[in-house]
Image (cartoon, rainbow, N blue to C red):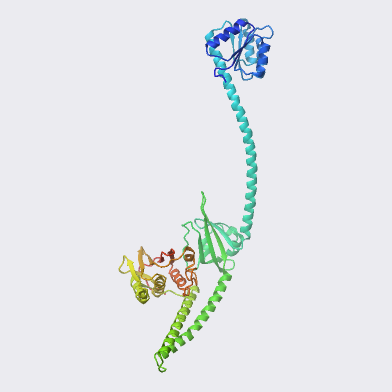
Amino acid sequence: MDKMGKILIVDDETMVTKTLDMLLGLEGFSNITTFNNPKEALLYLEKNEADLIISDFIMPEMNGIDFLKKAKKNQNDTSMILLTGYADKENAIKAINDIGIFKYIEKPWDNSQLIINIKNAITQTKLKKELNKKIIELEQANIKLEEYSKNLEDIVEKRTQELLEANSKLNAIISNCADGIVIFDNNSTIIDLNSAAEDLFGQNKKDLITKNFFELAVSEKYTKTNLNNNEKIFLRNYSIVNYKKDIKIPVEISIAPVLDKKNNFYIAVIRDVTYQKENERLRDDFMATLTHDLRTPLLASISGLDFVLDKSLGEITKKQSELFLAMKKSSEDMLGLVNTLLEVYRYEAGKTYLCKTKFDIIKLTKECIEELLPLAQRANMKTEINSKNEELFINADKNEIRRVLTNLIGNAIKHSQKSTKITVNIEQQEKNLKVDVIDDGIGLDKNDCEKLFNRFSQGTNQKRSSSTGLGLYLSRQIIEAHNGKIYVKSELNKGSKFTFELKDSINDCKVIL
């Protein structure tokens, strides 16, 4: 497109068109077309565009106003200038109103003013065309937007329907779930629950909303549940208070946090374990009865063997002595297993009472190491105690803590390579006690660590040890009975670190029965 614009000049006088052509050429306009016949000009305009049409008013075949009217049909955005004499001034003004011409110029004109008007007229044409182009683009964009909006509405409607269906299925699953489901906020205030949870609590939903969840779900050991870590937790030994039936229902509770940009809340899945608890009770009663009845014949067997070995019943040969010693050792091992099973049963049945006294944990640890010294010496292993304190008195059941220390240090010796070291770190953390037993043994993988403190777990999937799998389980029972926790960190071939912590154990204490 010519930067100066395309100009069409129509005048019946050849001298006028040549004069204007020459004048505009001197001003830098190069794209100029002239006609002395308006009809020929109209034919030209049917196939060509112009940025400015300059027309004389008085022409023999067609006057300028009629010509510009017809030209307007094909060149709607083109600016038009009418050249007129003084006598035609009124008609020129009318043409401005009827046709919308840019300007009329009286003859004779001032060349400088004419050039200014021509430039302004061409600028107006270009602005109109650019504006119309933008309008067309805007209309096209609007059409596309409407199509997109319609498609978006369809997509939104489809997605909404899918969400409604998914929500309906989810609500059906939650409503018909056999386990109770409770939603509560950071303050443990219940905000929603399903029908199974209503049955467990023995109350209607409207009566349970805004109540504190942990006033209805009670820990049998009265431990405080910490929900500040935004991690999933699993609660055992909990009961639901059912006021309708006036009973406590044993449950296991899985709690998971739900984090969003507005508010955090928790979802608790509550499972009634009454049937499982009853089966466990029957099983444990059977085991307790069996193990209790086994103690008497085992003790009798050991006593009888002692009589034989001390030659109270007569002389025996060396081979007989070795055989009887092996039989006594097996009977003693069996008695140890029976006693361990009884201890496990007592803890699970809640029939063990801690006798807490004030004692020096560092001194007790030294005693445990002395007891296990022959086992360590056979493996050429060293044991040491690290602590910032020379003595550290705690409030706990001394005999039970001794059992835990003996088990952890004994396991470290058994599962470590020869000529290595066992380290016991004893640390005071304000009023809390932390004890680490660290070895350089074979270590454990992550899956083994997760089930290590379960009953009858032997610590590894890779090989079967000769242990009963009850030592660490009993240690966990003892530590949890002290309102503490026990855990392990380990890697294969890099050793293990067993840790137990006792809260509020370092203080002035009294004997608790």
Q: Nearer the viewer, residue 225 or 489?
A: 489
State which quarter of the image contains the C terminus: bottom left
- Against 1, is 460 above or below? below
Residue reaching furthest to the left: 390
Residue 419 sits in quarter: bottom left
* Residue 241 as seen in the image, left or right of residue 157: left
State which quarter of the image contains the N terminus: top right
Residue reaching furthest to the bottom: 314
Residue 229: in sight, yes or no?
yes
Q: Nearer the viewer, residue 305 or 168?
A: 305
In the image, residue 409 lies at what x, y percent? 39, 71
In the image, residue 482 lies at what x, y percent? 43, 69
Residue 405 sits in quarter: bottom left
Residue 142 sits in quarter: top right
In the image, residue 289 lies at what x, y percent? 52, 81
- Against 461, is 93 above or below? above
Residue reaching furthest to the right: 61
Q: Nearer the viewer, residue 361 or 418?
A: 418
Residue reaching furthest to the front: 319
Residue 69: in sight, yes or no?
no
In the image, residue 356 lies at what x, y percent? 39, 73
Q: What count of labels does the image hold?
A: 0
